[in-house]
Amino acid sequence: VADNFGMKFYEEILLNAHKYLNHVSMDIPQIVLEIGPAQDQIESLMKKLSYKNFKIYKDMQGKRRWLTVYY
């Protein structure tokens, strides 16, 4: 099992993303991450890191599966 239910990797990616992203368009997601049930804290992490423009999409079974971030 990954540290902190895998949240460590998401936190590292999201903490450093600003170094690599371009301010292209608010219509095109700059980050797309697959998430699973273990990452139920992802919304709290996004707020903690001051991300405001993100959306979580569900898969065909209705489970939260994709995190998209607009930068």
Image (cartoon, rainbow, N blue to C red):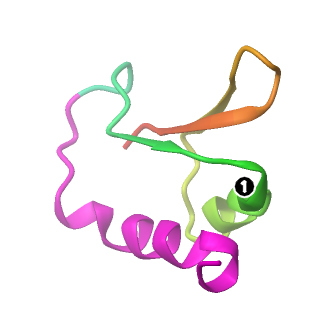
Which is the main secondary structure of the residues drawn in magenta?
helix
Q: Is residue 24 left or right of residue 54?
A: left
Give, as a single range, the part of the protein colored magenta. 1-24
Q: For the point 69% across and 48% down, which residue is it?
A: 36
Q: Which residue is mark 1?
A: 43
Q: For the point 62% across and 60% down, which residue is it?
A: 46
Residue type (three-letter) at the residue carrying disc 1? Glu
Image x and y of residue 35, in percent: 61, 47
Give the residue furthest to the top.
60
Image x and y of residue 15, in percent: 41, 73
Q: For the point 38% across and 31% down, which residue is it?
A: 29
The tally of labels here is 1
Image x and y of residue 30, in percent: 32, 38
Quarter in which the C terminus is drawn? top left
Residue 18 on the magenta span:
yes
Q: Secondary structure at mark 1?
A: helix
